[in-house]
Every structure is written in C-alpha cells, then in structure tokens.
Amino acid sequence: MSIIEPQPLVNPPTGPLFVSHVSHFSPCRFSLVIPTYNERRNIGKIVEVLTRILDKSLPGDYELIVVDDDSPDGTWEVAAALIPNYPQLRVMRRQQERGLSSAVVRGWQVAGGDFLGVIDGDLQHPPEILLQLLRAVEEGADLAVASRHVDGGGVSRWSFIRRFLSRGAQLLGLVMLPGVLGRVSDPMSGYFVVSRCAIAGTTMHPVGYKILLEVLGRGKIREISEVGYVFCERCEGESKVTWRHYLDYLRHLWRLRNSTEGKLGWWNKFNFPWQRFFRFGVVGFSGVFVDLAVFHFLRRELELGLTRSTILSAEVAIINNFLWNDIWTFGDASRYQRGKRQRLRRFLKFNLVCLGGVVLQALLVFGFDKLGLNDYLAKLLAIAVVTLWNFWINLKLSWRVTDVK
Ligand code: GDD
Ligand code: MN
C-alpha cells in the first residue's frame, strides 16, 4: 500500500506587497498564478490543461502557483495532492490574508519567472490563448491583456444587468482615472501576463478584485498588447463577486487616484489627444448646422410638430457627426474594425453615449442653476463638459482607441 506523503506548501510572504527585481526562488521563464477560493472541483482540470499547453512550449521552464485563501472546501489540499504528478506545480495556503488581488501579488512574490501571469481557477478564462499572451511579452510588450472588448472577444451569456454594471464600472473608471483605465480596452480583465521588471520595485496597494488596475496604475508599463477572448460560463462552483466588491472597486479607484505614486504615474502617462479632440469639435460644430437646417425643413416644409422636429433633426445631426467621426476623427481606428456589423455597433454606441450626454447636460444645468449661475453660463459650461464626455467615452468605448498598437 502506498502512502501519499503530505506535500510541502509554499509559505505565504508577509509585509508589503512588493515584487523584487531579482527573485530568490528558482528562476524560470514564466510563472502563472492561479488564485482560488472554493475551486476544489475545477483545480484538477485547469492544472491539467495548463500543464499540457505549457509543457509543449516551455518544457521545464515554467511554474504554476496556486494561491488559495484557506478555502473551506479544501482546494489547497486537493491542489497539493496533485504535486507528485505535476512537478511544475506549487501551492500556497494563505490563512492570515484574504482577497483576490493580494493573493495574486503574494503569488508573484514567490515566483521565479521573468514573466508573471494570472488566470482564474474556474476555467472561465480560456487557457488556449495563454501562449498568445506569452508571445506578446516575449516580443517586447511590458503587458499582455486578455480582453473581452476587442475582435475575437466577448462574454457568453451575460444578462443585460451584468453587462450594464460591468460597462458602468468601466465608464466611472474612465472618468476618474482616464490615464489608467483608458490605456486598455478591458481594464477589468483578470487574465494577463506582465514582465517582472515592469512591476518590480513598486509596492502595490490593491483593494478587492481588480489587480490589473494596480499594474496599470503603478507599474512601469510602456508597451501593451491585447488578445481577444470569450469569457466562458462557469461549469463548477460559483462566482465570489458580491455587492461588497463593487464598493471595493470604488475604494480602489479612489485610492489609486489619491496616492502620490498613482497620481504621478497617471498624469505623466496621460497624453490628451488634442488633435483628435479638435477634429471632434469641428464635426460637432458642423452638426449644429445640420441640426438647424433639418429642423427648419421639418417645421416649415413638412409642418411637423415641435417635439418631432427636434428629435428627428437631432438624430440626423447625430448620424452626420457619426459619419464624419468614423471616417475622419477616428478614421485610423475604424480601418481596423471593418465590416457593416462593426460599423453598426459603433453607431449604436455613439448614439448611446450621446444620449448619456444629453442626460448629463440636463443634470449639470440643473446643478449649476442651483449654485446660482446665470442660465446661459450654466448651459455653456454644461456643453463644454458634455463635449469632453462625448469625446472621451466615444474614443474609448465606441472606437476603442487605447494605448495598444
Ligand atoms: N485566493 C483567492 N482569494 N482567490 C479568489 C478570491 C479570494 O478572495 N476570490 C475569488 N478568487 C478566485 C476564484 O476562485 C477564481 O479562480 C478567480 O479568483 C475569479 O473569481 P470569480 O469569483 O470566479 O470571479 P468572476 O468570474 O466573477 O470574475 C472574473 O472575471 C472578471 C472578468 O472581467 C475575475 O477574474 C475578474 O478578475 C475578471 O476581471
Ligand atoms: Mn469566475
């Protein structure tokens, strides 16, 4: 009868969340962290699939690091029992600390790799694209992110509410931390590879779930690459996201915004696209005339009612603006997103963002009015803010112009 020896676990580091330039652990090319909490039924499968993929491309030169937060279902124990069959596997059981983001950094702290990655342990991130992410950093990118919002990306069966919350969270981040969240198309991704030197030497202060924000905000990230992926449905176990995580996200944005390092980081990196903004302004200006002309035509020639004329002429102006923006203001981005469907998507998003702008304008005028501002001044200020909003959100969400080449 064979006795299975209890496998030695990796001790969780303590102190600041700090990855050093030179690792004290056995060096290798690539270290992939798999954070887990109650993933007993997924862990075996994901370790098997990842091992199969990495054994082919990086035999003996990688490691998988499971970081488990003392799961009540004993994930760490199940993972540790796999070690004899998977020599590249290491397992950490954390009992003093909790939370996805810090788990990832703790994993990287004990890693020996030149490239550091993270993937969910529940098979919702397709392991097949891992090699593409790895290739991107090997070819010189500081960071390679798996994204749901570029070609080849998406979510499988998300409800409208979930999509809305996810996009709403991104929108808020784009306004609060434009120079951080605006750099990639999917800042909420929890699947990416970063080069060690890009994050070594900086102490991280993540809260909650979104470790990528921390990497983008505090790391020395110059070149970024993205690979599209479809976020699969979970087959086993359940998501750990609760309402508290949305609050954590807000706290995280706030902290990153206020930390001196973060501030320096994002202002230095923040390059406002003035030229594009100018073109956007010119197009918007042309829209005013289109709007007035069509309005005049509908009222005088077709004798339509005031409300109908207003709405119809506004929509014609939106179409006018969209077309010019699509071929001129953001023409370079449109060229990479060809096809009728893509164009229609951009158009619908553009409409939605403009609609949001109208609501925002009404709120602002109301607010400025309450502050005792003159009506016209209030309106003028609101127009300025809404123009910026329309520009920035369309740039990032409709045409998806990011720092990714
Ligand atoms: N160690 C540890 N500690 N792991 C955790 C914790 C924790 O407190 N909470 C969650 N995990 C692990 C889960 O076991 C899973 O492997 C992974 O982190 C993701 O958690 P889920 O609860 O399944 O998250 P999700 O599916 O809702 O969200 C994922 O998708 C997003 C897509 O935008 C996460 O990967 C996000 O990071 C990702 O952004
Ligand atoms: Mn999940």
Image: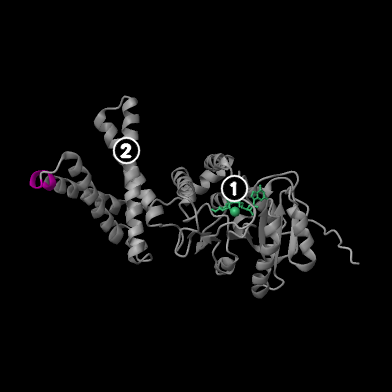
Magenta segment boundaries in residue numbering = 297-302
List x then y, in percent, for residue 284: 25, 49
Q: Which residue is mark 1?
A: 209
* Image-based side of 290 in relation to 43, left or right: left
Report the Cα–Cα distance between label 1 and label 2.
33 Å
Camera-nearest residue between 319 and 401:
319
Q: Which residue is mark 2?
A: 361
Above or below 365: residue 47: below
Q: Quadrant of ligand 2?
A: bottom right
List x then y, in percent, for residue 62: 69, 67
Indicate if the residue with disc 2 has its beta carbon within 8 Å of ligand 1. Answer: no
The quadrant the N terminus occupies is: bottom right
Camera-nearest residue between 82 and 258:
82
The crowd level at tag 1 (other Cα within 10 Å; few <14, some 14-19, many 20+) is many
The quadrant the C terminus occupies is: bottom left
User: Mark 1 belongs to which amino acid?
Assistant: Tyr
* Image-based side of 397 in relation to 230, left or right: left
* Image-based side of 259 in relation to 383, left or right: right
Indicate if the residue with disc 1 has its beta carbon within 8 Å of ligand 1. Answer: yes
Q: How is the image coloured?
A: one colour
List x then y, in percent, for residue 209: 59, 47
Number of dots carrying numbers: 2
